[in-house]
Image: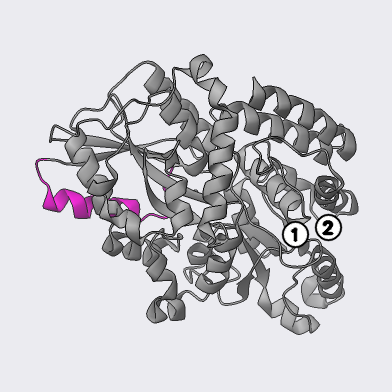
């Protein structure tokens, strides 16, 4: 789920469900001020004919093949791709503008998992009949919960996502160290590699630190991995804590010491991926899609065959990823809604998800694919990815998510650029989130 396209919870799904429901109830008062609350019933999915699929920029190069497979079988119901910007913020902005103007130019929307509540509450997407989407019963339960608002289905999970730690296996082997499980171990590994002739010019670590949705993810992962939370299970913000401070300070100290290169303050997913593929990073936090691109042997990757993947590091042990992924929803203003629903079923099928995994290394929502022996042989990252997804923490499921994530980004960016001390940034963020989530 990388956020330039915009691009999962302990399999104890009940904990996720409870958390999301509490968060939803905590922001229940937002409905009237943000567009009128969720739809009142399942819409009739009628009309067949051409449709438009609105999605972020496709960097995998495989989407045209997926759409072509549909179009060849449905010549009278062809899908046209409307490719939106690379950044998640730019994608959301165009989708929101389209919905606010009640335009029918988008039929199926490729939504980041955190947009469900906002789009459902504002009646920009349709409530869907759960019994018409059989893939839901095959998906990782946590992915299905991201497609719901107030326990009603508004989208269908297509891809899931968990953050992974990419590392230069060749350099770690040369230095005689194993993949780290903690931040301290990672920094120690960087020092050992830096002492090698082969380590010259290789920076220690980078994630996504530009002021956009990826920063919300990286900040949340640092906080969660240190034992803190951004929003608690009671639906209330709880970010002004020693644990959250410890997590944020891991990042600020990284920038101050040079372990995180200064250039990383401008990194989104693609900038970081390119730096890793160019051999400029020893460790890199990113999504599964990077695996396929970094493995290419066409000259585009200098690290093909030289890297491995592991769970994210934490304060005292393996860290915690933010739950990512993308869901497909039907625009409330779309024509040919029956075709839109059929296209979603097609893309949610095991066949299409398997093909997408094989071509792009994106995480599927189908649970069985993670345990497929043949796929595991081709994609050895599936085991750590499944562990990442099962432990992952969701971002707040709130109607005013755009305002919430903007506040998180502002606070984290101010701390990373030394505009504010980490403690002050978290105190100010606590105040801002309390206002946004309770009003």
> From what the image shows, is residue 306 above or below residue 93?
below
At a point 38% along the width and 62% down the height, the residue shown is 366
Q: CA distance from mark 1 to mark 2?
A: 6 Å
On the image, the x and y values in percent for residue 246 come to 85, 50
User: Is residue 70 one of those drawn in magenta?
Assistant: yes
Residue 367 rendering spot, x and y as whole percentages: 41, 65
10 Å crowding of disc 1: few (<14), some (14-19), many (20+): many
Q: At numbered mark 1, what does the secondary structure look like: helix, strand or loop?
A: strand
Indicate left or right for 420 with 296 as reference: right
Residue at 14% x, 52% y: name it: 72
Camera-side residue: 224 or 250?
A: 224
Q: Secondary structure at mark 2?
A: loop
Is 316 covered by the magenta stretch? no
Look at the numbered discs 1 and 2 and tell me whether their residues touch, using CB distance below 8 Å: yes
Coordinates of residue 395 in the picture (x, y in percent): 60, 43
Query: Would you identify the image quadrant in which residue 209 lies?
Result: top right
The picture quadrant where one finds residue 174 is bottom right
Label placed on residue 236: none
The earlier-in-sequence mark between 1 and 2 is 1
Residue matched to label 1: 205
The 10 Å Cα crowd at callout 2, few under 14, some 14 to 19, many 20 or more, is some
Q: Nearer the viewer, residue 174 or 4?
A: 4
Along the line of sight, which residue is nearer the eye, 112 or 194?
112
Q: Could you say where residue 332 lies in the image, as x and y percent from the top left?
A: 30, 26
290 to 396, vertically: above or below: below
Provide the residue designation for mark 2. 259
On the question of residue 62 being in view, the answer is: yes
Magenta-tinted stretch: 56-76
């Amino acid at each position: 789920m990388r956020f330039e396209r915009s691009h999962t919870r302990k399999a104890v799904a009940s904990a996720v469900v409870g958390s999301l429901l509490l968060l939803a109830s905590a922001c229940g008062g937002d409905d009237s001020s943000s567009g009128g609350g969720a739809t009142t019933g399942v819409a009739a999915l009628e009309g067949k004919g051409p449709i438009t699929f609105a999605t972020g920029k496709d960097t995998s190069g495989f989407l045209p093949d997926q759409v072509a497979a549909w179009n060849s079988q449905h010549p009278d119901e062809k899908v046209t791709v409307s490719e939106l910007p690379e950044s998640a913020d730019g994608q959301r902005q165009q989708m929101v503008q389209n919905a606010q103007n009640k335009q029918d130019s988008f039929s199926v929307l490729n939504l980041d998992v955190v947009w469900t509540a906002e789009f459902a509450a504002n009646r920009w997407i349709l409530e869907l009949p759960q019994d018409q989407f059989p893939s839901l019963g095959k998906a990782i339960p946590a992915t299905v919960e991201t497609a719901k608002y107030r326990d009603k289905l508004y989208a269908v999970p297509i891809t899931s996502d968990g953050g992974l730690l990419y590392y230069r296996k060749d350099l770690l082997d040369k230095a005689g160290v194993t993949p780290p499980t903690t931040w301290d171990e990672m920094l120690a590994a960087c020092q050992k590699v830096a002492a090698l002739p082969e380590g010259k010019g290789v920076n220690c670590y980078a994630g996504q630190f530009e002021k956009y949705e990826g920063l919300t993810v990286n900040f949340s992962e640092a906080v969660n991995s240190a034992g803190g939370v951004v929003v608690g299970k009671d639906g209330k913000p709880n970010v002004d804590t020693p644990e959250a401070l410890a997590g944020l300070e891991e990042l600020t100290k990284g920038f101050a010491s040079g372990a995180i290169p200064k250039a990383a303050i401008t990194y989104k997913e693609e900038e970081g991926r390119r730096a890793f593929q160019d051999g400029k990073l020893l460790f890199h936090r990113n999504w599964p899609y990077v695996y396929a691109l970094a493995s290419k042997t066409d000259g585009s990757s200098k690290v093909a065959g030289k890297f491995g993947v592991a769970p994210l590091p934490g304060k005292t042990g393996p860290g915690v990823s933010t739950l990512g992924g993308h869901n497909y929803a039907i625009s409330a203003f779309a024509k040919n809604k029956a075709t839109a629903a059929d296209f979603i079923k097609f893309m949610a099928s095991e066949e299409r998800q398997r093909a997408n995994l094989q071509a792009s290394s994106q995480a599927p929502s189908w649970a069985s694919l993670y345990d497929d022996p043949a796929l595991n042989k081709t994609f050895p990252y599936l085991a750590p990815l499944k562990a990442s997804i099962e432990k992952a923490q969701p971002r707040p499921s709130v109607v005013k998510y755009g305002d919430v994530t903007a506040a998180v980004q502002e606070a984290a960016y101010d701390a990373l650029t030394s505009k504010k001390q980490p403690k002050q940034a978290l105190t100010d963020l606590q105040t801002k989130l309390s206002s946004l989530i309770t009003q």
